[in-house]
Image (spheres, rainbow, N blue to C red):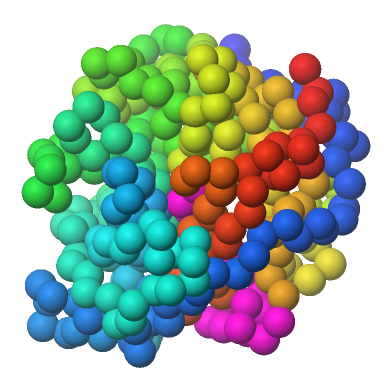
Amino acid sequence: MMNVEERLYEKAISFYKELKGTRENKVEDIFERKGLIVSDQDFLVQNYSRKRPKLAFNPGALLEEKTLHVFPRFIFEYYTYTSSVGEFSVNIEDVVNNNLKLPVEAKIILWPKFLWEFKGCEDPRAFKDKEDLIILYTGYGYSLEDNKLTTSIVQALAKFDKNFSIIKRGFFKIKSTEGNYFIPRSNKDSALLKAEDDDAIMLTRPLIKDIELGWRARANLNDITIDEESMEPSLWFEDWEFKVGWSTNVLKLSSNEFLVGWHGVLKEDYSYRNGLAIVDNEGKLLAISNYLLAPKGINEEYGDRPYVIFGNGLISYKENLVWIGGVSDYAIGFFVTELDKALEKLKWIQ
């Protein structure tokens, strides 16, 4: 009898063989660069004794009227790379008009408290649930096995009230058909499509044996579990990629269409390149682009982790699509294009 990981691995292999070869290895960068916020020179943290983070990158984002809330990943250490999640706000008009006012004032709203996130709270994605804010983030820490610490990477959830006070916190486990729980060695790069009370549809990226591709699933936000039976692969990697993952929150286009950013990690230069996809209200892939956003020039190619534009915020404003992403692990970039222009680049597969 197969266990949870073996059953999921079988699904992944079957899916990969079916859809491999749909995308091309080419970049058509359609985004204009609209400003860069650079770590310690552009941030003032208000609620911590150290005011200038060494690094600020990989931000989530949420738009409320004209206020763009940005949730950066902060690092204050040189050696341990321990991350926290902050918050700052800017006017969306200042973003699209390339008129950001610097430095920005920020506060830390999430930092490590538990063993499973001891080494950092990383790469947030934001989702508004009625009056509350849900942030999905990577908990990088340890599990205790046989009285020894083993490194773990979990898909974590934190729910905040309107004052950014935490009211719930934990990490996702996969609930098997037998009622047991499975925790992958790594699970990250997730986004919520929708939530009704505690029942949600999510996109996620568990490591299943040696395969990292995008999945869709049903989740329970009360006990923070993913239903194994509902899990289906939805995003695959191509031969020239090590892996793929979901990059951003989702944007609702219609009752059954959601736009989401994704990334691929390339074998040729170990770069992160980004594209867009449309999924239905169950997370099934409907359309996908080739790469539409990739590092170019010294400011994007050179940093603490070179050749990266990564996640994590995607918002629409008027006719614009705005991607808010980390730049080579040292800065936050704002990338803008016309929404219609972006949608024209997607290839329908369903």
Give the camera-side residue of 33 and 163: 33
Q: Quadrant of residue 132?
A: top left
Q: Quadrant of residue 76?
A: bottom left
State whether residue 317 is above or below residue 104.
above
Give the camera-side residue of 228 and 343: 343
Task: Look at the image and tell me in which quarter the N terminus lies.
Answer: top right
Relative image position of residue 58 (x, y in whole percent) = 45, 62
Q: Which residue is found at the position 50% from the left and 21% from the top?
A: 217
Q: Which residue is found at the position 58% from the left and 22% from the top?
A: 257
Q: Which residue is found at the position 35% from the left and 47% from the top?
A: 62
Task: Look at the image and tell me in which quarter the C terminus lies.
Answer: top right
Q: Which residues are magenta?
A: 297-314
Q: Which residue is found at the position 38% from the left and 81% from the top?
A: 39
Residue 40 in view in this figure: yes
Left or right of 152 in this view: 334: right
State whether residue 18 is above or below residue 277.
above
Q: Is residue 310 magenta?
A: yes
State whether residue 96 is above or below residue 207.
below
